[in-house]
Amino acid sequence: MPKPTPVVDYSPRGGERTEFDPAVHPRKTFSFGTNTRNRILSQPQFNPQFVGNRVISVRDSASGQQVNPEGIQLDHSISWDTISKVMADHNALLRQQGKPFDPATYYTLKDAKLYYNDLQNLHPVLGSLNASAGARGVQNLALIHQGLEMYMGKVQSAWQNLQQGIVSIGYLGEEEKATLLAAKLQEIAQRMDGLTEELF
């Protein structure tokens, strides 16, 4: 079978004449190109919000939340472990058949770099979800109602502003404010839980 052609905004250096081997080239070998992250976050299906040319808010594809892009990581829809195994098995089969190394038929290190940056296989997820997903990757869930996206974004923005305020309270050692805020946050959490129960 011909090797699939990835869709990339990335030009890797080197690796054209190096056979891909997951034992020699583990995941930590690879990285995203400088333009890959911005290309993914700017895609319309992730509801990017811009200030000038900078993305300031994007929809997390796993939870449907509108979030600050600083908390977002890129994840492979088809996990990298799966892609890596397919390439390794393909190369092993060619070796068993006695075929000499040829970059046109074998998967190379350059191919691996390109597949790692394949725009069609990447989506934005919260870093905490990405870190806990393991080999299976993060599964795509249904998106939230489009009419609610703006309001979810406002809630997320307000929460991020409040987080900054909480940090300043900690630096200033204002225990009285912290006690008051703890009660308010508990009240907000209870109201959100109550709303969830009421809706579902």
Image (tube, helix red, strand yellow):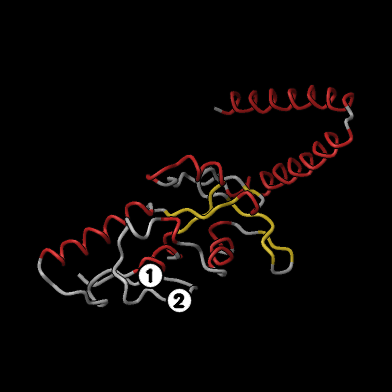
- Residue at the spot x=34%, y=59% of the render? 24
> Where does the N terminus fall, quadrant-wise?
bottom left
Q: Quadrant of residue 91?
A: bottom left
Query: Which residue does the numbered mark 2 point to in the structure image?
Result: 13
Query: Which residue does the numbered mark 1 point to in the structure image?
Result: 6
Q: Is residue 146 above or below residue 109?
A: above
SS at circle 2 = loop
* Category of crowding for the residue at label 1, using alpha-carbon neighbours closer than 10 angstroms: few (below 14), some (14–19), many (at least 20): some
The type of residue carrying mark 2 is Arg
Residue 197: x and y in percent read 59, 23
The type of residue carrying mark 1 is Pro
- Nearer-the-camera pick, 133 or 192: 133
- Nearer-the-camera pick, 159 or 172: 172
Horizontal placement of 106 versus 27: left or right?
A: left
Q: Earlier in the sequence, mark 2 or mark 1?
A: 1
- Residue at the spot x=48%, y=39% of the render? 132
Cα–Cα span, label 2 and label 1: 16 Å
Horizontal placement of 102 versus 7: left or right?
A: left
Q: Quadrant of residue 156?
A: top right
Residue 104: x and y in percent read 25, 77
